[in-house]
Image (cartoon, rainbow, N blue to C red):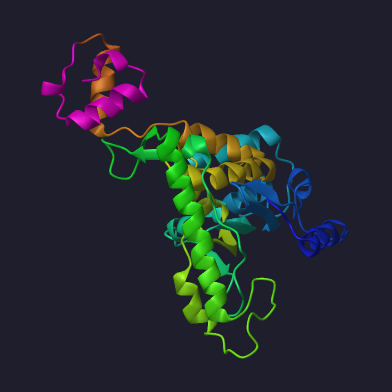
Amino acid sequence: MKLTKDQTQEIKNQQSQENKTKRVTVQELEKILYEAIPVLDHGFIRVVDYMGDDTSIVQAARVSYGKGTKKVNTDVGLIKYLMRHWHSTPFEMCEIKYHVKLPIFIARQWIRHRTANVNEYSARYSILDKEFYLPGAEHLAAQSQSNRQGRGNVIEGDQAKQVLDLLKNDAERTYKNYEEMLNERYDGTVIDEKKIGLARELARMNLTLNTYTQWYWKTDLLNLMNFLRLRADSHAQYEIRAYADVMLNSLKKWVPITYEAFMDYRVGGTEVSAKGKSIIKRLIKGEKVSIDDSGLSKREWNELMIAFNLEDKVI
């Protein structure tokens, strides 16, 4: 990731601000506020604003004012109770805003989470930066043979080099054509004074999906956790998971009590069906249970066994 001098100065100016407020602030999150945290080769994430903290959730749940005389461990218990019983509304009282720079193909996957306010860099108004995502060799994988939307073994040797060359050359060629159609280079200089450039809203259609875009993404705490539960998961695509991991760390700094409850009940927990619950009860009692009398499909059975570290019973 490389920031321009103007971007670097803007961040320094934002971080040097000292504003007095009666609103709640979180010191750990304040330490990274506005900081551009690198993601992938040219991307970044910045926390640019937030509202509320763990006490805001507790206050909303109790419909009270101020911290009162409640002890921290009582607040911990209440937040765990809310998380455990899916009482979600109090978590909606906290909000956070991110500035994200990401490849277009990841942005299109990300935007499927329709629970945030988004304002994206306008390629109708401005020229997109000449930056493209190229995966590292360790992430250049073949199509999975068992998962239509997953990756298989890493591609190596001459084939890997060929793929990377194709990605790089295609991106550079289409960007060059983009500039030609605009009759303008990415730095703003005109290519040919005698020509009229094509409208930006039309020229942009030629760009590859690994071109970087940027947006501001604002959401509440509940929907942030729903996003992270899916995108910080090991099954998520690596590129979007890289962003989710950074956001997960910002969640820990922002609302540490909620973070611990989230990791315990959502990330580390397991949802079990009524049939699955019955099977686990029988196994605890020492009864023999087979897939034939379980009422579960092979996939459900295996997922249940893996969730409870019973790999020897996986079929």
The residue shown at (71%, 52%) is 36
- Identify the image quadrant of residue 160: top left
Residue 72 at what x, y percent from top left?
Answer: 70, 36
Residue 74 at what x, y percent from top left?
Answer: 64, 35
Q: Is residue 9 above or below residue 241?
A: below
Between 69 and 144, the one nearer to me in the picture? 144
Q: Is residue 47 above or below residue 175?
A: above
Q: Does the magenta run of residues contain 304?
A: yes
Is residue 288 left or right of 41 when viewed as pictured?
left
Is residue 159 left or right of 3 when viewed as pictured?
left
Q: Residue furthest left?
A: 292
Is residue 2 left or right of 268 when viewed as pictured?
right
The part of the chain drawn in magenta is: 288-315
In this view of the protein, can residue 124 be seen by the observer? no
The residue shown at (57%, 70%) is 119
Q: Is residue 256 above or below residue 119?
A: above
Residue 17 at what x, y percent from top left?
Answer: 87, 60
Q: Is residue 238 above or below residue 126?
A: above
Q: Does the magenta run of residues contain 293?
A: yes
